[in-house]
Image: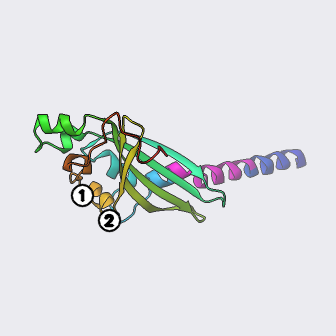
């Protein structure tokens, strides 16, 4: 009888530990994906990013800084042609001439127990064929994405990448 009671107690202890792990041990990426932040707490971060009509692909990564802070990045490839329907095909081709990739980066910090996520920064990055990057950070980007509004690109306003022969102005990060 004592052996049976001990095995039931051990089984209950293992079950309790498993439940605690399943309920409270989601990783930082999952914490951010499921977070509900302003400007619209009715949707998760993941829902807001995946419903944005100008993203083609989203990659999630996480890292820790030297102080142990956890960060999550959502790197979202932008469908520039869809976003810039007003621009002529000739203008779009000229503006994209030396562009390798256009993407949006949303950075979040995850802290506390239970873990909570908060938005840290949002930026548009144009990666140029000569290795330089044009980066512009704007707190309005996240709001535009949540509202499904097109984001203005500086490369389409005459500030596109320098030609192949020019040295990189900003080395890749």
User: Does any portion of residue 86 appear in the rendered image?
Assistant: yes
The residue positioned 69% from the left and 53% from the top of the image is 16
For the record, the magenta segment spans: 14-29
User: Does any portion of residue 26 appear in the rendered image?
Assistant: no
Query: Which sits in the foreground, 63 or 101?
Result: 101
Q: Are marks 2 and 1 in contact (CB under 8 Å)?
A: yes
Query: Which sits in the foreground, 123 or 58?
Result: 123
The residue positioned 21% from the left and 48% from the top of the image is 158
Mark 1: give few (<14), some (14-19) or many (20+) Cα within 10 Å.
some
**In the image, is residue 101 above or below residue 145?**
above
Q: Magenta stretch containing residue 166, yes or no?
A: no
Q: Main secondary structure of the magenta part?
A: helix
Residue 39, labelled with which disc? 2
The residue positioned 10% from the left and 45% from the top of the image is 86
Q: Quadrant of residue 96?
A: top left
Query: Which sits in the foreground, 52 or 103?
Result: 103
**Residue 160, x across and y down, in percent:** 27, 44
Residue 147, labelled with which disc? 1
């Amino acid at each position: 009888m004592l052996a049976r009671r001990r095995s039931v107690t051990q089984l209950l202890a293992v079950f309790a530990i498993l439940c605690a792990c399943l309920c409270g041990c989601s990783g930082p990426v999952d914490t951010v994906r499921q977070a509900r932040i302003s400007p619209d707490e009715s949707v998760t971060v993941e829902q807001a990013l995946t419903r944005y009509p100008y993203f083609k692909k989203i990659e999630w990564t996480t890292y820790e800084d030297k102080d142990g802070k956890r960060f999550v990045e959502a790197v979202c490839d932008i469908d520039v042609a869809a976003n810039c329907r007003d621009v002529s095909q000739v203008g779009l081709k000229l503006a994209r001439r030396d562009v390798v990739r256009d993407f949006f980066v949303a950075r979040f910090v995850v802290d506390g127990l239970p873990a909570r996520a908060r938005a840290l920064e949002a930026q548009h990055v144009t990666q140029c064929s000569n290795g330089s990057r044009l980066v512009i950070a704007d707190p309005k980007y996240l709001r535009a994405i949540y509202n499904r509004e097109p984001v203005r690109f500086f490369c389409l306003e005459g500030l596109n990448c320098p030609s192949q022969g020019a040295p990189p102005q900003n080395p890749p990060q």
